[in-house]
Amino acid sequence: SNCRPWLHCPLWAPLAVAVIDRAASMSVLLWLAALDGRPRRRSNKLFEPSKGEQPSLWELWESLAEAYDWGDVVKLMRTWLMPEYRTVGLDDKQAHNVTMRVLMSAHHQGVRGRRIHLPPHLCLTCCALGSARLRVIFVRSPFARLVSFFRMSWLGNPAKAHNRWEDFSVFVRYVSEAHGENSSAELDEGGLPLRRLQWDLNGSAADEFTHDDMLHTRAMSEWLKDPSLGEWPLSLQTFRVVHVEHLREEIPQLLDVLCNEHGFCESLPSFPRVNSFTSGVPQDVWAACWSDPRTVNRVLLRYRRDFEWFGYSQNPLQEPVVGVGLGRVRSESP
């Protein structure tokens, strides 16, 4: 669940958070789920799966998962969904429609496996401006974001023609071309146009760099300036910047600001660490990814504002990639 380009505004803490793909996004969403929720239902006649005084979305999701019991749709319907629907006042037709959406992937056998889609009232809370809240964005070096996404979605993927570490430079060129940077000049090493089509398993041509790839590699600064924000642009200078490279140091600083500037001094859930991989990228692989200056330059051009706004080093081999400390967006625009 993600509110982009709007902000996540959890019920139990005065935060307004912009979540960015491949910038500890799953950890941030789980943290927000522990801070979001609804008031407790007091009547014994109402279905209340939570045991806490302030039911969090995380707790509700956990009870939902227990009822699902690794694919027991009948148990899920009988012990959780139908009592919940009655409690929130859905009629039979509405309950049927919501159930169809919830279970549309319950028997899915693809890469993501079986899963259920949350009913709308169990999704994270979104807001447009985050008024009277502490506005926060979690960011990560553009170099690291690209390597992380390539490793997660392209490396070893049979649906991609360029699925080896040796192909990383081609992936970066796709990113540059797809977002309109020097697209007419993108040629492969032999002077030919960059190949875009890959034959899928059904024998039909498909674009190797998909819309999903484009969204996951979009610049962080572009999410903050998204045109769909319309008449309610975000006030960029009010955002506090948390660098995921320094979460251990900067999360406590964020809590201090929350207390000193917003009067919210309650303890918050610990920040979860969810990693897609059991180990980091080997140093020799990382160095090889950035061995070609043209690849580095394409990233610097494509993510110019990200480097400027969030203070990241333009050298992919430099350590640390950014200074420690809760930051501000370094944009000159209002």
Image: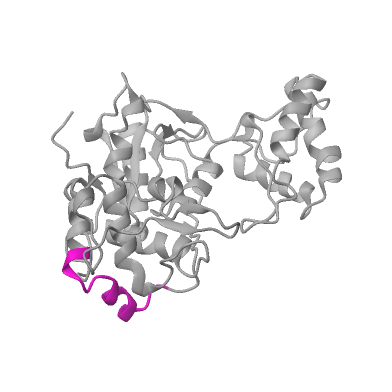
**Which residue in the rendered view is the most extreme toward the left?**
332
Name the side, left or right, on which 194 lies relative to 331: right
Q: Nearer the viewer, residue 6 or 240?
A: 6
Q: Is residue 235 above or below residue 62?
A: above
x, y percent for residue 321:
23, 63
Q: Nearer the viewer, residue 288 or 265?
A: 288
Q: Is residue 303 visible?
A: no
Name the side, left or right, on which 312 lies relative to 68: left
* Residue at position x 62%, y 59% in the image: 111
Q: How is the image coloured?
A: one colour
* Residue at position x 82%, y 21% in the image: 92
Name the side, left or right, on which 266 lies relative to 322: right
Q: Is residue 116 magenta?
A: no
* Residue at position x 33%, y 38% in the image: 223
Q: Nearer the viewer, residue 105 or 322?
A: 105
**Which residue in the rendered view is the most extreme toward the bottom?**
284
* Residue at position x 24%, y 34% in the image: 236
Q: Is residue 323 above or below residue 36?
A: below
Q: Quadrant of the C terminus?
A: top left
Name the side, left or right, on which 147 lies relative to 32: left
Q: Is residue 239 above or below residue 29?
A: above
Q: Is residue 291 magenta?
A: yes
x, y percent for residue 193:
27, 58
Q: Nearer the viewer, residue 102 or 254?
A: 102
Toward which corner of the image does residue 146 lie, by quadrant?
Answer: bottom left
Is the magenta region chiefly helix, strand or loop?
helix
Which residues are drawn in magenta? Answer: 280-295
